[in-house]
Amino acid sequence: MKLTIGIDIGGTNTAIGVVNEKGEVVEQQSIPTPSHGDVDQYITDITNAIAKLEKKVSSINPDAEILGIGVGAPNGNFYNGTIEHAPNLSFKGIVPFTEKLKEKYPKYKESIALTNDANAAAIGEMVYGGAKGMKTFAMFTLGTGVGSGLVVDGDLVYGNDGFAGECGHTTLIPGGRKCGCGGYGHLETYCSAPGMKRTAFEIIARDNAADSILADKSFNKLESKTIFEAAEAGDKVALEVFEKTGHWLGISLADTVHHISPEAIFLFGGPTSAGDYIFKPTIESMEQHLIPVFKDKVKVLKSELSLGHAAIVGASALVWKLLE
Amino acid sequence: MKLTIGIDIGGTNTAIGVVNEKGEVVEQQSIPTPSHGDVDQYITDITNAIAKLEKKVSSINPDAEILGIGVGAPNGNFYNGTIEHAPNLSFKGIVPFTEKLKEKYPKYKESIALTNDANAAAIGEMVYGGAKGMKTFAMFTLGTGVGSGLVVDGDLVYGNDGFAGECGHTTLIPGGRKCGCGGYGHLETYCSAPGMKRTAFEIIARDNAADSILADKSFNKLESKTIFEAAEAGDKVALEVFEKTGHWLGISLADTVHHISPEAIFLFGGPTSAGDYIFKPTIESMEQHLIPVFKDKVKVLKSELSLGHAAIVGASALVWKLLE
């Protein structure tokens, strides 16, 4: 049985999983992502966790063979294997992450790689999910932010510096909402989970919508799940939030189609659980914003990666791409 | 001496040129693009023109060897070698253009290809121009419309259907200016030559700018060259046209950087003759709209292809890419 290891580095926790060829997580462990900024200590923590996982796996299946380690990290640079100036991590500057991992695992010298979470998710979709066999597609991850990964002719687009695929920060509305990155009007400020909340508050304010279910929640308490539940209950504000979010997302997806003309665009993340509430207006808007030559050609699909494991699974898929 | 043939199919004329390895046009001829819709007759006209060019070339240099034929055509599909539903040509439906050419030239069976003009220009830049040796870059052509070609890891991005790279039709301002394609707010409506004219008229109307040089021209008479001359003369309206055009173009270039993270973006076309008037605000705006990781990394350069010959030269470069 051939297995790969996926590491998902989050701001608070680091999830490490052993993944089989179908993209299923067979063993998993979580350790804190340190706030002390000591990378070497962190690498030691990771290797200890991996040792435990390896032991478990081989006790269950003595024939199990681990092929390598893939890492998904914020500001991860595929070319250099570095994590660069990640604002939510305690490690400052440029961290030579894969180099340090390779020192610990000489046997995986050729099969350790790192990229950012959304790129990893795109590779996961290609290796294990709905994009199997597709040559050109895009992945948009909707969550706290909006991430993206682009695949052209079977390869992830890393660009000149290793950081390509940041469509969440394309300008949707010039001079629009303030973005966490310092910019304005970025897709992320409209179509992330917090973006949907901002839309809800705009609509409530505009309509003085005291009768909305959402009018009883503070800005800090409102979750995108609640907006979905309210939409299902027929709440007008919530329904308009999905209409608007889909409208905006569709404009951006059309822009991406005009760039790379993908076979499909996959959507991943909490908001996609809302099904038609989000997919219907998104597809309508995308089609409306395409030039004729692209109309009715591009599929918009829900990611087949499971919400809870996608980051680990995506990271682990990097190994398969390396070994191709 | 190794030569290639480039064919540039325009709405009115078809330019056919023989191009040397440096990207210089050594012989050239122009024939009308027919309005009669008879493709076979058109192909015969083209082969007659090529026969004359071949004769001329071999009379000057008996060692000259022609390697193949590249075609730049509106709505050109690289994968199928077809021209599909081109609104400005008399040939209706899907024309199997390279297939018909190959019937006439069995010797070039492996070295005949077709794509759209902007893609051809991008390949020309890569084979003969400023993008030599670059792996990932973008080309924007500013003219009657705005075209684009994207190169990722040394290959032009054709996408799933052969039509990728239509950045002129990305949405710059949702619900904005009406575009020739039927859409609204597309980059092309702001940053093409006619887009600049529309901007001039908006500013004149807004400011009641009777004292502008441009206020003496009708909408149908105003050319983008005149706007450049007015800017050089210090005309406030013209100067603002360049500021705004650059501001808008910079937003779009930033969007493209967020997609593919290119080493450089090349600008081609009449408006680029305005030099700093257009490049300065474009670069400032692009930098302003980039997330930190991309800032001060991406060069914005003037295309090195000559204005008059770029389409032929770009088309001819397709042959070199095929023979790689």
Image (cartoon, coloured by chain):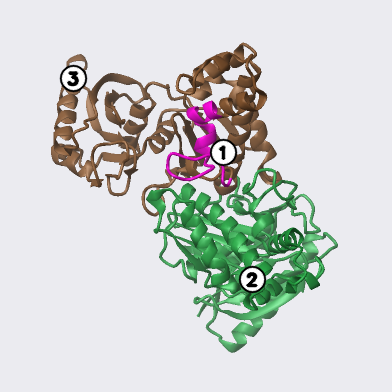
Chain colours: A green, B brown
Circle 1 sits on which residue? B263
Q: In the rendered image, which quarter is residue A237 located in?
A: bottom right
Give B61 or A178, whichever is nearer the viewer. A178
Residue type, label 2: Gly
Dot 2 alpha-carbon crowd within 10 angstroms: few under 14, some 14 to 19, many 20 or more = some
- Which residues make up the magenta segment? B174-198
Depth check, mark 1 against mark 3: the one in front is 1
Q: Position of residue B186 (x, y in %)?
A: 52, 41
* Residue B191 drawn in magenta: yes
Q: Which residue is mark 2?
A: A270
Q: Residue at x 69, y 76 (%)?
A: A51
User: Does label 1 or label 3 sit earlier along the sequence?
Assistant: 3
Q: Is residue B314 left or right of residue A9?
A: left
Where B81 sits versus B28, above or below?
A: below
Name the chain under label 3. B
Frontmost of labels 2 and 1 is 2
Amino acid type, mark 3: Ser
From the viewer's side, name the closer residue of B240 and A257: B240
Give a yes or no on whether discs 1 and 3 share a subunit. yes
